[in-house]
Amino acid sequence: MANIRLTMRKIREVLRLHFECNRTHREIAQAIGTSTATVWQYLHRAKLAGLDWPLPVQLVSDDAALEAKLYPPPVPRALPRGMPDWPKVHRELGKPGVTLDLLWQEYRAQHADGFGYSWFCKTYQEWAERLPVTLRQTHVPGQKLFVDYSGKKFAIVNPDTGEIREAELFVAALGVSGYTFAELTWTQQLPDWIGSHVRAFAFYGGLVEVLVPDNLKSGVHKANFYDPDINLTYQEMATHYSVAVIPARSRKPRDKAKAELSVLLAQRWILAKLRNERFFSLDAANQAVAALLVELNSRPFKKLPGCRRSVFDEIDRPALRPLPDRPYQYAEWIVARVGPDYHVEVDQHYYSVSYRYAREQVDVRVTANTVEIFHRGQRIAAHGKSARRRFHSTIDAHMPPEHQAVVKGCDPQRLRNWAVDIGPHTAAVIQHLLGARKHPQQAYRACLGVLRMGKDYGRDRLEAACRRAIDLKAPNYKFIASTLKNGLDREPEAAAAQADLPLVHANVRGPSYYH
């Protein structure tokens, strides 16, 4: 199920990057972490299915409908003459003792009517000559923005305690001009990572076509050469700004040489210059960084005319795309599983979905004010975010019919009648439990647990335990169960100590003493 959801998400991203961002197959493959052949296959299937961009409304969020459109049942047809798998042949040749002759014999064993040995060797050589070689990067104005962290931290002093806390230096640089943005953040975590991107776009006053990050966990969920998964929040931000994310290969600094150079310059002309100064807040430190950033971008080139700022104004700035009307609002994505009570836990609060999705895996999008729940790309619930822990946000329409009957007052009334039959203190406890939650069914099990203690311990003992719970202001299931288990309901109530003292005693002075 999770693999299908991930595949459909990647296919939508391929279509967006191809039609909206006009990216090449190779760039799209790097962005979504797959091969160019897979990208070609996705686009070919979309063409056969008659799909264009934007997708029809019914396919935007319905993974099952999109899967059925792209992968219809296969039509039986005659098998063509076997074509060798050249990437596999190339990999096998790298193994000790493996030759083209051996691989051709294995190929003919699978395809009796396959091609001859001479054709096999000649075609492989032609295919191998087309393998890529190391390419010098040629940057296009306004196309790429390289982003990374410095690695060297900056100390900030707490003015109240004198404690030193280290901040991270985020650095971004444009491909052609090298025009640099830098700022300090407390961490490299996802909120700071996304926030730095939003502020970088505002700094440049426009948008590039491609973001080139390192394989940082905040940007790349799974750093893998063959299948790097982009973090969902990072991908959502890229979609909001209509940019492509193409991570640099792991341990390949040549892929982001511009970022490496800008990081080095930021360390030399910002961090090194501020090394002897003390700052007591992150804002004050960032003001100093911004002032030195102006100097860095205005420093003349040694071998070329102009500086980073002048090249940016002349070449990069005109090529940038305009910013959207509103900046991206940070949202965090969480993978969760719906409980048997059809609620999803987020930050120790429980949000309801339709009972039909009980025990299903879902994606949860959390912003500062909302919680949205998605199943296979389709939104199935939305709630206002609540800070109350261990409480439920339940929509009546999400309940099964029998639970809706409970809300309407059928079963709670039966519980009240049962409690009244045992005694007034038991009735008061049950009334308190039912009234403590917005929906009575959330306290239904606790009420049943209390009432069934009357069968195990007797009604009189249960009534005494409930009276004790009310007196001690603990009318809940756990306190009553503990009271009965330990026999505390049988203990007499403690009388006030002063009541047992005699009112007349030789050592008591009395009121006349003070006249």
Image: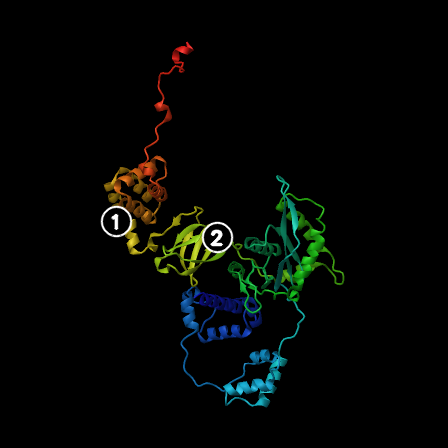
Kind of element beneath mark 1: helix
Q: Amino acid at mark 2?
A: Thr
* Rendering quarter of residue 223: bottom right
Quadrant of residue 473 within the rendered picture: top left
Q: Which mark is residue 358?
A: none
Depth-wise, is mark 2 or mark 1 nearer the camera?
Answer: 1
Percent coordinates x, y for residue 320 in the rendering? 60, 61
Q: Residue furthest front?
A: 506
Q: Can the viewer see residue 484? A: yes
Q: Which residue is identified by label 1? A: 410
Q: How is the image coloured?
A: rainbow
For label 1, the crowd category at 10 Å Cα-Cα, with few meaning under 14, some 14 to 19 and many 20 or more, is: few
Position of residue 56 relative to residue 438, above or below, is: below
Q: Which residue is mark 2?
A: 367
- The amino acid sitting under disc 1 is Cys
Residue 158, given in percent of the width and then of the height, sits at 62, 42
Residue in front for this viewpoint, 299 or 408: 408
The percent position of residue 287, horizontal first and vertical second, equals 65, 47
Rendered-image quadrant of the N terminus = bottom left
Q: Earlier in the sequence, mark 2 or mark 1?
A: 2
Q: Is residue 440 visible?
A: no
Frontmost residue, 81 versus 384: 81
Which sits in the foreground, 505 or 200?
A: 505
The residue most toward the top is 515
Q: Quadrant of the C terminus?
A: top left
